Image: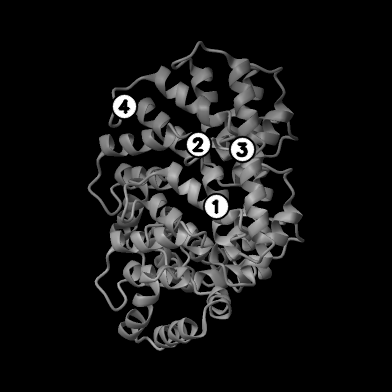
Amino acid sequence: MIKLLRTAAFLLCMVVATPPMAQDFDKGLAAYDAGDFVTALKEWRPLAEQGDVDAQYNFGRLFDNGEGVLLDDEEAVRWFRLAAEQGHARAQNTLGVMYDYGEGVIQDDAKAIRWYRLAAEQGDARAQSNLGGSYNNGNGVVQDYAVAANWYRLAAEQGHANAQTNLGFMYDNGNGVMQDYSEAANWYRLAAEQGEANAQTNLGNMYNNGNGVVQDYAEAAKWYRLAAEQGHANAQTNLGFMYDNGNGVMQDYSEAANWYRLAAEQGEANAQTNLGNMYNNGNGVVQDYAEAAKWYRLAAEQGEANAQTNLGFMYDNGNGVMQDYSEAANWYRLAAEQGEANAQTNLGNMYNNGNGVVQDYAEAAKWYRLAAEQGHANAQTNLGFMYDNGNGVMQDYSEAANWYRLAAEQGEANAQTNLGNMYNNGNGVVQDYAEAAKWYRLAAEQGEANAQTNLGNMYNNGNGVVQDYAEAANW
């Protein structure tokens, strides 16, 4: 149940009430603040039964929170309603919350909106924020980001931290307002300085990405830490990433793993994936493939594409799990269908080699193409090879050379070797020994054995280079 905060409304009640009632209310409030809920109940009951709206509201809170009485949402609603019908703004907002979440009443978005609106129009910041949320999500009203932003703004200008966070998000994403990163950062900061963890995380993101502020990894890490220490899972993940990569903090794999673990144990999928990576690579923890596979699986089952790819790779190679090509192909497919380029490439390999699936060159080429069009160098190389040899596609040396070149320019050694072959043999390009030697050299310097052999042949025969038997022998 959402705990509602006491505000100066209590003081206002004591001013306008008759002296005896004010004294009784004051006794109840003092008892409540001291944690003596039974006395608070005793003092407020007669006032509430006489129709005192503040007593009715606070009496309802006792039932709502199970303080001095058994928790009873229906009884809480009864007292909130009595106060709300007399125009008590806080009670109206709280009754809206009860309808919003179906606590003590049948869940009803329309009734929640009615009560939120009555309170919001009286200037109640919580109600304004809640009404903004209803318009933002289309609960009980037609979704309308502009109206949501207006209600968030009214609450934010009163210092309501959640509303400030939400208004910042509207500016961050251009929902209902013109996108304005600087304005987003301003609202996030106001909420973050009040300790609002979502705002601290989002402000950290602004500094991490340089949106609306000057990029500053140290400042990003500061805000992530403040939220992470409150248990905010996304902030814990992001702070772990900062330690993992040495952004804004000294690189520290152990610290990264600690923050990833805290978030992963809350079910945060990116943290689970990253913690799996730590175990897979032995960074900050003892290398443990089984533990890596465990964390990958938890994230993969939530649909996290990188984790699905990595879990597929574990099955593909028998790391931490029994090798199972069919299971590998299944996980690769789930990620590939989300557009994950490594998974598309690996699924292409499964079809190319007939591992875990029926061999199908056309299907292999399809998956290679999807990854290659995203700039994946290995997929570009493999798709070039399919065109080079007419596997799953019509043989086309020119198309092969084009794909090899895209990968070769990214430094992919096999593609450099194959592109060298195209120039050496004049397939798909004008024969050019010097160009062939250039690409062979780039691959050879990366240790690619075929390229080293071919470059040696070029020196041995003086093709594209000055003949040099010693250099040939070296390669």
Marks 1/4: CA distance?
66 Å
The mark nearer the N terminus, 2 or 3, is: 2
Report the residue marked by disc 1.
118
Q: In this view, does 458 lie to the left or right of 392?
A: right
Q: In the picture, residue 268 is in which quadrant?
A: bottom left
Task: Give the residue drawn at x 52%, y 36%.
Answer: 378
Q: In this view, does 441 lie above or below 154?
A: above
Q: Residues within 10 Å of mark 4 (few under 14, many from 20)?
A: some
Marks 4/2: CA distance?
20 Å
> How far across and how far down the image is residue 323, in percent?
25, 44
The mark nearer the N terminus, 1 or 2, is: 1
At label 4, the amino acid type is Gly
Q: Which of marks 2 and 3 is in front?
A: 2
Report the residue marked by disc 4.
354
Marks 1/2: CA distance?
51 Å
Between residues 200 and 346, which one lies in front from this camera angle? 200
Q: Where the N terminus falls, by quadrant?
A: bottom left
Q: Are marks 2 and 3 in contact (CB under 8 Å)?
A: no
Between residues 118 and 317, which one lies in front from this camera angle? 118
The mark nearer the N terminus, 3 or 4, is: 4
> How far across and how far down the image is residue 110, in percent?
45, 42
Q: Do the residues labelled 3 and 1 touch (CB within 8 Å)?
A: no
Marks 3/4: CA distance?
35 Å
At label 2, the amino acid type is Ala
Q: Are marks 3 and 4 in contact (CB under 8 Å)?
A: no
Outermost residue to the top? 394
Report the residue marked by disc 3.
456
Q: In this view, does 312 lie to the left or right of 383?
A: left
